[in-house]
């Protein structure tokens, strides 16, 4: 293994040193508590770096493809719809993010371990309880993407477990699937920090999304879903940049790096707007996703939320 690989593996340790220095200089902190998962990840990383000169075998390592995709054969739904092709923000300035491991499960585990010790956003690290990486089937054909963890997700370390997450679980079940059959992740892996004593959640900043989205891109590269669903305007913005309102984008397939993507309202929107009219809009988006995946759709499913 060469010097570049050693540099990539040592990057989280260097970032941790910078974070501790940040706390010492700005907050006078002298000690930093780490979760057990972070401690284990750092121990494994340090041991791997120490062993690099003696390693006789190179692990399977491949870079995430950062080139703009060559236009593939257009996707078509049963009604002849072609996904819109939006410009994906250039990743040329991102640090290299490597994927290692012989299976999808192992590759995602390695990425999760690296994310667990990431300290690139000191303000988020200072208040997070867990890095919320993702959950679900590494072989999933369907992937849901949200914006960032909320308070309950931060405490549990799993995406979409609060009220909005419970509604998402019901939406997935209405499609005839379980959470364990899809993959769920967020643009940002740490809960956006709130001022002390202020309840609720906030939208991640542009910088926070740009810093963290390489992890999501690596997850997509590993899983290779057949269809993605972006939950809410912030998730769409994290993938494509500012491209419009969710109301104008939903219901029509976009294309993200050769994968059809359906934008729809975030489940929290439906918690605030519980009319069947709004529920039907989201359900129609999911029916299109089911159709794109060639999933069976019953007449009962086609009729959900038609009554005002």
Image (cartoon, rainbow, N blue to C red):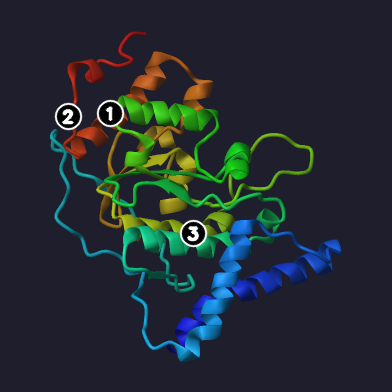
- Separation (CA) of disc 1 from disc 3: 28 Å
Badge 1 element: loop
Q: Disc 2 designates what residue?
A: 296
Q: Disc 3 designates what residue?
A: 112
| Disc 3: CA contacts within 10 A as few (<14), some (14-19) or many (>=20) | many
Q: Residue at x 73, y 59 (%)?
A: 33
- Residue 5 rendering spot, x and y as whole percentages: 46, 82
Residue 61 lies in quadrant = bottom left
Q: Residue furthest top?
A: 308
Badge 2 element: loop
Please tell me whether residue 239 is drawn above or below residue 173 in the rendered image: below
Sooner in the amino-acid sequence: mark 1 or mark 2: 1
| Disc 2: CA contacts within 10 A as few (<14), some (14-19) or many (>=20) | few
Residue 225, visible in the rendered structure: yes
Q: Residue at x 29, y 28 (%)?
A: 175
Query: Is 61 situated left or right of 39 in this image?
Result: left
Please tell me whether residue 5 is drawn above or below residue 227 in the rendered image: below
Front residue (pair 152, 211): 152
Residue 118, visible in the rendered structure: no
- Residue 295 rendering spot, x and y as whole percentages: 19, 34
| Disc 1: CA contacts within 10 A as few (<14), some (14-19) or many (>=20) | some
Answer whether labels 1 and 2 touch (C-beta < 8 Å): yes
Query: Is 293 situated left or right of 197 in this image?
Result: left
Q: Residue at x 61, y 44 (%)?
A: 154
Please tell me whether residue 266 is drawn above or below residue 305 in the rendered image: below
Q: Disc 1 designates what residue?
A: 176
């Amino acid at each position: 293994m060469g010097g570049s690989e050693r540099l990539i593996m040592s990057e989280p340790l260097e970032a941790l040193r910078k974070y501790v220095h940040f706390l010492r200089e700005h907050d006078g902190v002298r000690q930093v508590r780490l979760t057990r998962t972070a401690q284990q990840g750092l121990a494994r990383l340090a041991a791997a770096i120490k062993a690099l000169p003696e390693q006789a075998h190179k692990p399977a390592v491949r870079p995430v493809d950062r080139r703009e995709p060559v236009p593939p054969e257009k996707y078509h739904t049963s009604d002849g719809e072609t996904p819109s092709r939006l410009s994906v923000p250039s990743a040329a300035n991102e640090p290299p993010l490597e994927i290692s491991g012989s299976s999808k499960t192992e590759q995602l585990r390695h990425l999760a371990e690296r994310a667990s010790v990431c300290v690139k956003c000191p303000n988020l690290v200072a208040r997070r309880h867990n890095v919320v990486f993702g959950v679900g089937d590494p072989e999933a054909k369907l992937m849901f993407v949200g914006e960032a963890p909320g308070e309950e997700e931060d405490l549990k370390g799993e995406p979409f477990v609060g009220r909005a997450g419970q509604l998402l679980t019901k939406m997935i079940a209405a499609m005839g699937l379980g959470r364990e059959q899809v993959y769920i992740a967020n643009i940002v892996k740490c809960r956006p920090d709130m001022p002390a004593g202020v309840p609720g959640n906030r939208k991640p900043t542009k910088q926070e999304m740009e810093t963290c989205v390489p992890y999501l891109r690596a997850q997509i590269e590993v899983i290779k879903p057949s269809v993605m669903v972006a939950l809410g305007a912030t998730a769409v913005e994290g993938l494509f940049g500012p491209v419009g309102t969710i109301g104008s984008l939903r219901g029509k397939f976009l294309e993200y790096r050769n994968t059809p993507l359906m934008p729809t309202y975030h489940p929290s929107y439906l918690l605030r707007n519980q009319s069947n009219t709004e529920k039907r809009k989201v359900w129609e988006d999911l029916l299109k996703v089911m159709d794109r995946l060639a999933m069976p759709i019953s007449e009962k499913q086609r009729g959900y939320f038609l009554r005002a």
